[in-house]
Amino acid sequence: MPNPAILVIDDDPSITTTLSSFLKAKGYNVTVANDSDDALEVVAAGQHRLILCDIYIDRLTGLDILRAARERDPDARVILMTARGSIGTTVEAETGGAFDYLAKPLNLKDLLAVIERATRNSAAPAEQPPTEDLQEFGGMIGFAPAMVEVYKRIARFAKSDETVLILGDSGVGKELVAKAIHDHSKRSGKSFVALDSGAVAGSLWEAEVFGALKGAFTGADRDRPGVIDGAQGGTVFFDEIAEIPLEFQAKLLRFLQEKEFRPVGSNRAKHADVRVLAATNRDLEEMVRREIFRADLFYRLNVLRIEVPPLRSRRTDIPFLVKRFLDESCEKASKKLWLVGGASDALAQYEWPGNVRQLQNVIRRLVAMEPPGAIPEEAVRRELEAGEAEDEATGLDAVERQHILRVLEQTEGNKTKAAGILGIQRRTLYKKLARMHSAHGGSGG
């Protein structure tokens, strides 16, 4: 396929001459314009889908050329260049749909790489999974046998009012499963209230779940309803149920058995008309053996059970998930991108330790970082390698381990507060704690 025609625009003739000679030697058909009037005339003719333009020309700027070119042809590839870059012009170039933004003096090798990428990105998108196949169940997409089993259990368990324990690795979509159970149940017209158990301080559990009356403790300046009150008639979902402290586990068990609760500071019991769902990515049976999770609470939660498969065990679903996430992200960013070459294979073959959530975040970052057009394999692999580097950066030494343990002690085990003090994301703290656990025979969390 022949190289496309390139329009080169700069008010400095020496620059357009140099660039024209260089690009013609590489096989490109080059048209030159040294002022904005000539440039707009050539753009209006619509013969150039690839434009290399200086930001500062004369009475008009490269941003004006960008707007004119994109109005004439939304798929036009406009590469802007400037010796006087600023945050303002960079942002305006990005929001205006510029393919790339280069600083002068230009490195001709880098310029050629950008032009070749723009040329490749003007090709038609590779065939994607048909849209009509993207039927979803409760926000979930998947046709692998393990996911069909999840759907069957959701449908069956939605008819019951028993507790459901949802198991699966981090990022598989356990809350989506819980919400789907609620949405297909007789309680669907009432509230679905999710509680992140890892975000509640040990001393506040009773007030958070059961509520508290005014004056019940320091700072209680008004009656505060708990999540049970907020979900009356509906469903309460305890995410990360393994994080509930032992001292509250007995009270939660009593509530599950009696369906009654007493707000902090109250002498009167209240009836609860709620269904309870719970989820965890941890091995509760092992925690029961280690006596850090009550056996009777485990059995009370484990009446019905759903195990959500990791993404690596249902690779046939990955292309459909990629299409859904790519379509969503492109719509939000007002960009058009697609995968080419081995990009799809790179995504399908990756192990995805962070599961569906990690895949979604990778696609979001690619859409944010890549210019409109084709997403090549190297961009995908670069993003995956960056994620692995972040994971490796969570390795621990003895000093860091002691610091984490001290902060957790200060926050009474509240991992959200601890992560804030440590200056890291909560998921990163969980990774560090998991490494501490495996490296020290289960000590330290």
Image (spheres, rainbow, N blue to C red):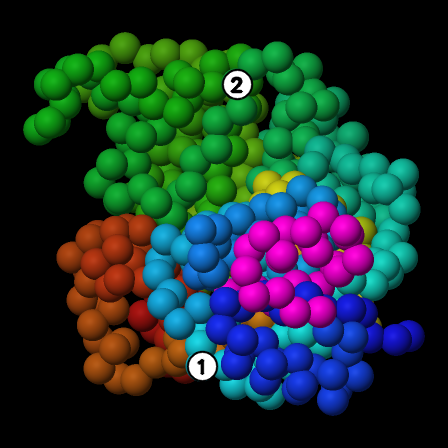
- Residue 12 as seen in the image, left or right of residue 127: left
Q: Say if mark 1 contacts mark 2, CB within 8 Å.
A: no
Residue 439, above or below 224: below
- The answer to whether residue 32 is magenta is yes
- Residue 207 as seen in the image, left or right of residue 439: left
Quick one: label 1, few (<14), some, or many (20+) residues within 10 Å?
A: few
- The answer to whether residue 51 is magenta is yes
User: Picture coordinates of residue 426 (x, y %)?
Assistant: 37, 57
**Which residues are drawn in magenta?**
31-54
Q: Residue at x 52, y 85 (%)?
A: 107
Kindly give the residue lying farthest to the left in the view shown. Answer: 218
User: Picture coordinates of residue 218 (x, y %)?
Assistant: 8, 28
Q: Residue at x 44, y 77 (%)?
A: 104
User: Image quarter for residue 395?
Assistant: bottom left
Residue 305 visible within the image = no
Q: Residue at x 54, y 39 (%)?
A: 278
Quickly name the residue at label 2.
191
Residue 348, above or below 299: below
Q: Secondary structure at mark 2?
A: loop
Quickly name the residue at label 1.
105
Residue 83 visible within the image = yes
